[in-house]
Amino acid sequence: MPALMIQGTGSNVGKSLIVAGLCRAALRRGLKVLPFKPQNMSNNAAVTEDGGEIGRAQALQALACGVAPHTDMNPVLLKPETDVGAQVVVQGKRLTTTRAAEYAALKPGLMGSVLESFRRLQARADLVIVEGAGSPAEVNLRANDIANMGFARAAGVPVVLAGDIDRGGVIAQIVGTQAILDPQDAALVAGFFVNKFRGDPRLFDDGYRMIADRTGWPGFGVVPWFPGAARLPAEDALDLAGNGIGGPVKVACLALSRIANFDDLDPLKQEPGLAVEMVLPGRAIPGDARLVIVPGSKSTRGDLAFLHQQGWDIDLLAHRRRGGHILGICGGYQMLGRSVSDPGGIEGPAGETPGLGLLDVATVMTADKRLTRSAAVHRASGLPVSGYEIHIGRTEGPDCARPFALLEGRPEGATSPDGRVTGSYLHGMFADDSFRAAFLAGLGASASGLAYAAGVEAVLDDLADHLEAHLDVGRLLGLAR
């Protein structure tokens, strides 16, 4: 079945968003379309119905296609645990943990799994839209590549190259990419487009023609900046610096060094009564915060050390003394306890690290990983709350007698005796509109009546309209073979 690949001149040029918009545009044309990314690197993962995990961007693209996310949509997911090492997830399941220097030797053995997943998607769809990773201009990584031209060559998929004018030098980005590509790789490129233009796109007409003349590649359009992107779930931790709308109630979230599954914040950022602030390294937790969130982490003990280095442990104690609330989610929940023990060295060197002591619980890391979509009942409000779990470790202790929720009739999470410190393994809880309203009421904040899921769907439709207006979508999709 036909397929088309969108590659970029660099990271964060907007490939994920463009693929999501093209998926929705193809769906509205009556096509059964599916997304695919051979290799992704992200600690913001989504749990799939078949019990695995993929990058959050591919889950959003699946939503744009009107289908449930599946592990075949992102067969290789790299989850950084340190500056030099990452967990390797293949077709939804952890394969190994490897250092960056060792991963190059591992890649040739992964192409089979990548092509296997791709062929399965092709068998289910009228069209597969593929997203590259990073840039094909990283020719130092071309040997055994499975993410860009290596995949495109192996699968016989045509490529369209996206350039990012917002970061400057877009003519050099695209022309330079062609200049250093292997001729056989360059022959796969069927055209280009320019993304993230601010202002009147006609002002770039001369530059657009220069790119076409220099490369010989046809252009498919200039896409203006899409403001609605801020209302879609973000995958890259680099996108976290932006704050929410700026209401009277402040929510602070710690920007941990290995922050994971931070899409928990997306619905809160859209509440007009809240000001969601990411507390970046080197900054203190704001004294006027009503709630502090300690988010998920890919390396709980490593981020505990990082948290202490920032002095946030002292800030959290002061915040609680002032009567503030604290919510720990997943790895953040583990940090709030008395200790985090990793006897098997699953997340790093074996050992035990003292926790923050804000909850009377302790965590022991275990080899088995819980990956599931979950439906629970919030204990304080009695309201249903849904989300997903993606964690290793078992947490127990006296404060578990005051659970955050009941999950399949069993207690989940923990709460301090005064009710101001809470921990839970449940990600995605704030996407549930009724629960979010009840939780905010407990903070003394009013919910806006935001319908979060419907809002995401509306933005995907707006994105497809945006691309239809500025790209030659019909001709672009017509390239697929």
Image (spheres, helix red, strand yellow):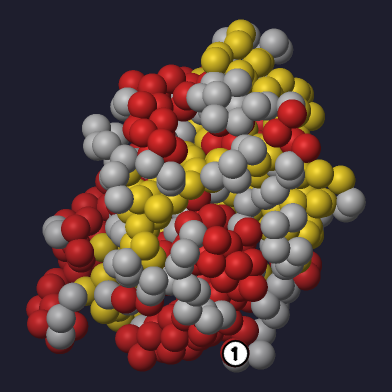
Q: Residue at x 21, y 74 (%)?
A: 197
Residue 320 higher or lower than 119, as above or below? above
Residue that badge 1 annotates: 28
Q: Crowdedness of circle 1 by 10 Å Cα count: few (<14), some, many (20+)?
A: some
Relative image position of residue 238 (x, y in whole percent): 34, 48
Q: Residue at x 41, y 31 (%)?
A: 317
Residue 404 or residue 80, whichever sits in front = 404
Disc 1 element? helix
Which amino acid, mark 1?
A: Arg
Q: Is residue 438 left or right of residue 237?
A: right
Up/down of 174 relative to 365, above or below: below
Q: Quadrant of the C terminus?
A: bottom right
Determine the image quadrant of residue 274: bottom left
Q: Position of residue 308 (x, y in %)?
A: 38, 22
Q: Nearer the viewer, residue 184 or 351?
A: 351
Q: Residue furthest right?
A: 409
Looking at the image, can residue 272 be seen?
Answer: yes
Q: Residue at x 53, y 81 (%)?
A: 449
